[in-house]
Image (cartoon, helix red, strand yellow):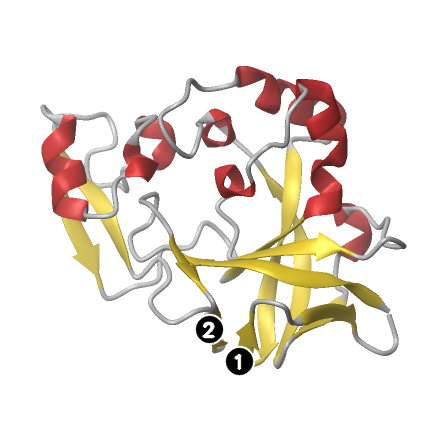
Amino acid sequence: MVVGTLAGIWRYPVKSLRGEPLERAGVDAEGIPGDRASALFVRRGHAREGKTFRGKEHAGLHRFSDAAAAAAALGGVDLEVRSGHRYFDDAPISLLIDRWLDDLDAHVGYAVEPQRFRPNFFVRAAREFTTQESQLRGVALRLGGVGLRVRGPIERCVTVTYHPQEEPADAEILRFLAGRRNAWMGVYCDVVAPGVLSIGDALSLEDGN
């Protein structure tokens, strides 16, 4: 069964900072090479001393692409960039399908930007696709030349209220997700078959699903 067509690919070199749009990507067992390969850590000046400084700690963090510039702009918080590890919240791949946004779009009255959810892959659904996140737990998917297996839905936090550019935050987004969708939007996936994918590739359920 065809789920839809790949419409967006993003890699996030530094966790919580601006993503890079890609037209094509290789994917290995740890996800897209270079994705979340670095993170900001608090040295002093914030309650998260010794821990990662995440998007929820600052509403504008996602607008920076350079870690040093982000650290300098925050003022009063001493941050350092650490690398050599993959700083995922959970799984190496996050996947968002536009069909899951439909009710949210209708509720807030505009097309909610997929970038708010920081997916690796954004898919435009085929007309017949109606499956929700919880129904995909454990399901095997094929996206271009890459095999994925869904872990489960992604529980969202305040960062989805932040606009991708400079417009004000919209708290109604998280209120809707919490009240109507268990705060879920999108799914986490593991890579079961490394490969290459490109914009325009099909996402499908593997045989047996």
- Residue carrying label 2: 25
Mark 2 vs mark 1, CA separation in Å: 6 Å
For the point 60% across and 32% down, which residue is it?
Answer: 112
Helix, strand, or loop for circle 1?
strand
Quarter of the figure with residue 1: bottom right
Instruction: Tell me: 16 left or right of 71.
Output: right
Crowding around mark 1 (Cα neighbors within 10 Å: few <14, some 14 to 19, many 20+) is some
Looking at the picture, does residue 38 appear above or below residue 158?
below
- Residue carrying label 1: 196
Count the numbered circles shown: 2
- Residue type at mark 1 is Val
Instruction: Tell me: 76 left or right of 6.
Output: left
- Residue type at mark 2 is Ala
**Which of disc 1 and disc 2 is earlier in sequence?**
2
Q: Position of residue 59 (x, y in %)?
A: 34, 26
For the point 50% across and 53% down, which residue is it?
Answer: 90
Helix, strand, or loop for circle 2?
strand
- Checking the image for residue 181, the label placed there is none
